[in-house]
Amino acid sequence: MHPLGTNMLMVLMTGPQAWRINKLTDSEIQTEIMTVLKLIYGNSIPNPDTILVTRWGSDPLQFGSFANRPFGYSDATLDDFRAPIGRLRMAGEAYSLKDEGFVHGAYESGIETANEIIKCLRGSCSPKYKPSYGF
């Protein structure tokens, strides 16, 4: 371990490469990563202590899903998407105004939604977003 603490490297794959990598074993993925890192930093770089591979493309709870707003998707459309439906409130990275597709976007969205629910439980329930479609 580095004297200043734990070092971590994160690799994100998209498109066809993500699907290709999703089918490899952890060991095969580590070999590919180390090949690239050794090309950049030389052969003296050590192998990682551990490797964690998330297989979002084959995880039955995800199947590769993440937010991807189409071109022309406005803030007003997102407000409609985020609007409560009755007592139902939603949260997650897809509901984030500025950090869609990222864990911290999901985290921030969850805090915002939880605060809205707390206000409702305290008797001052006034939804921040009102859907334009009339619910």
Image: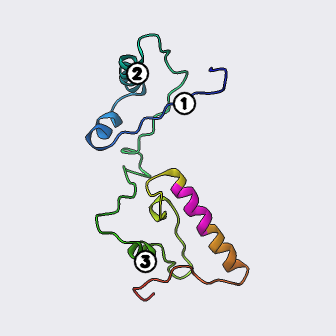
Element marked by disc 1: loop
Side (left or right) of 132 relative to 127:
left
**Given the image, on which type of amino acid does mark 3 rest?**
Asp
Q: Report which quarter residue 133 is drawn in.
A: bottom left
Using the image, tell me which numbered label, if any, was put on residue 80. Answer: 3
The residue indicated by pointer 2 is 37
User: Are the residues tagged 1 and 2 within 8 Å (C-beta)?
Assistant: no
The residue indicated by pointer 1 is 8
For the residue pair 44 and 82, the one nearer the viewer reads as 44
For label 2, count other residues whose C-alpha is less than 10 Å away and answer few (under 14), some (14-19) or many (20+): some
Side (left or right) of 122 relative to 30:
right
Q: CA distance from mark 1 to mark 2?
A: 13 Å
Tell whether position 109 is magenta. Answer: yes
For label 1, count other residues whose C-alpha is less than 10 Å away and answer few (under 14), some (14-19) or many (20+): few
Q: Which callout, 2 or 3, points at the residue further toward the start of the chain?
A: 2
Element marked by disc 3: helix
Q: Nearer the viewer, mark 2 or mark 3?
A: 2
**Given the image, on which type of amino acid does mark 2 rest?**
Leu
Relative to 5, say whether 111 is above or below: below
Q: Which callout, 1 or 2, points at the residue further toward the start of the chain?
A: 1
Q: Residue at x 41, y 13 (%)?
A: 42
Query: Where residue 82 appears, x then y in whole percent?
Result: 47, 72
**Given the image, on which type of amino acid does mark 1 rest?**
Met
Q: CA distance from mark 1 to mark 3?
A: 38 Å
Relative to 96, say whether 42 is above or below: above
Magenta-tinted stretch: 105-113
The figure's colour scheme reads rainbow
Q: CA distance from mark 2 to mark 3?
A: 44 Å
For label 3, count other residues whose C-alpha is less than 10 Å away and answer few (under 14), some (14-19) or many (20+): some
If the image is split into quadrants, where does the N terminus sit? top right
Residue lying furthest bottom: 134
Query: Where residue 16 appears, x then y in whole percent?
Result: 26, 41
